[in-house]
Image (cartoon, rainbow, N blue to C red):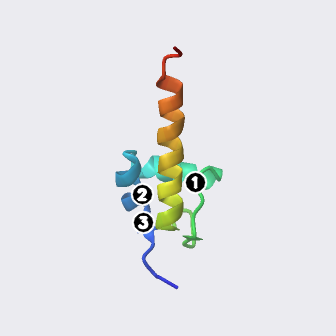
Amino acid sequence: MSSSFLTSADVAAILRRTERTVVRLAAAGELPYIFKGNGQRGAYLFDPHVVEMYARHRRDRRFKRNRIPA
């Protein structure tokens, strides 16, 4: 098993969002995470493959919303 997980800061850079927004998405259950550290400020760790799928889904959804019907 690979130990190359992404931090909230890494995910924020990939999604072009703030780190706080990434934490909110994870806490709300919208962005799946692998691990959350102890306490209120515990770090979140994310699977790179899941983050990539999430980012692709957001891009596809945004693209479909901005398309002009023929």
Q: Is residue 25 above or below residue 59?
A: below
Callout 3 touching callout 2 (CB < 8 Å):
yes
Whichever of labels 1 and 3 marks the residue nearer the N terminus, that label is 3
User: Is residue 26 or residue 62 the one in the foreground?
Assistant: 62
Say what secondary structure mark 1 lies in.
loop
Residue occupying image coordinates x 52% and y 85%: 1
Task: Count all numbered tags in the image, as a single digit.
Answer: 3
The extreme right residue here reads 29
Residue occupying image coordinates x 53% and y 16%: 69
Callout 1 touching callout 2 (CB < 8 Å):
yes
- What mark, if any, has residue 31 been given in the picture? 1
Image position, residue 14 (x, y; %): 37, 53
User: Is residue 65 or residue 4 the one in the foreground?
Assistant: 65
Three-letter code for the amino acid on which mark 1 is drawn: Leu
- What mark, if any, has residue 11 been given in the picture? 2
Image position, residue 13 (x, y; %): 34, 53
Residue occupying image coordinates x 53% and y 51%: 54
Disc 3: which residue: 7
Say what secondary structure mark 2 lies in.
helix
* Cα separation between marks 1 and 2: 10 Å
Three-letter code for the amino acid on which mark 3 is drawn: Thr
* Cα separation between marks 1 and 3: 13 Å
Residue occupying image coordinates x 46% and y 81%: 3
Whichever of labels 1 and 2 marks the residue nearer the N terminus, that label is 2
Image position, residue 27 (x, y; %): 60, 54
